Image (cartoon, helix red, strand yellow):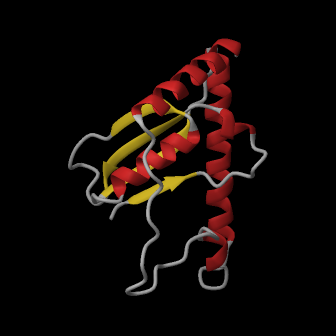
Amino acid sequence: MGALVTLDLPDDSPMLDLPWIITFGPLADPAEWEPVVCGPYERPHALALAEAVVAEEQLMAVVEPLLPALSAEEIRGEIAAAQLAADDEAARIEASDLYGDFDDVVDDQWEPAAAGAEQPEPLPAPTEAEVRAGFGRIAGLLRER
């Protein structure tokens, strides 16, 4: 079984309505082969497809929103925001007590699976027709933007 990584967003996040992509890569050595990027999909389809693939193979799947920027300035703004967030996180980790604040630097959702615990079944992958219908909705969303 592989690993799936995605954003944990609130139910009212506007990012949920964006197109999403999946990046598949090796779970162990990133130099093994070049990652494969698929999409765009609607988020539920991206998650279900990623789960279906990593459920049977030792791969990592990263499911993330595709930001349809319309200008170089928008892209620069997204890059600056990501860099600022990374700097803030690095400063927060550096300022934390190495032993006392471990919970602050580990994802709250992370819980190691108990030995022998049964893993939940992955969501069923969408059909080709469902994915194609999603492509149509994404195209409409991008035309509106």
| Residue 138 lies in quadrant | top right
Q: Is residue 85 above or below residue 93?
A: above
| Residue 128 lies in quadrant | top left
Residue 108 spot, x, y in % from top left: 64, 71
Residue 76 spot, x, y in % from top left: 63, 25
Which residue is at a point 44% across and 29% down the rendered structure image?
129
Count of labels in the image: 0
Question: Horizontal placement of 51 versus 32: left or right?
Answer: right
Q: Is residue 17 above or below residue 112?
A: above
Q: Furthest-left residue in view?
A: 32
| Residue 3 lies in quadrant | bottom left
Which quarter of the image is occupied by the C terminus?
A: top right
Which residue is at a point 65% across and 34% down the rendered structure image?
80
Residue 93 spot, x, y in % from top left: 63, 66
Which residue is at a point 29% across and 59% down the rendered structure image?
56
Front-most of 66 and 143? 143
Which quarter of the image is occupied by the N terminus?
A: bottom left
Question: Horizontal placement of 78 versus 63: left or right?
Answer: right
Q: Furthest-right residue in view?
A: 12
Front-most of 144 and 48? 48
Residue 37 spot, x, y in % from top left: 38, 35
Front-most of 133 and 117? 133
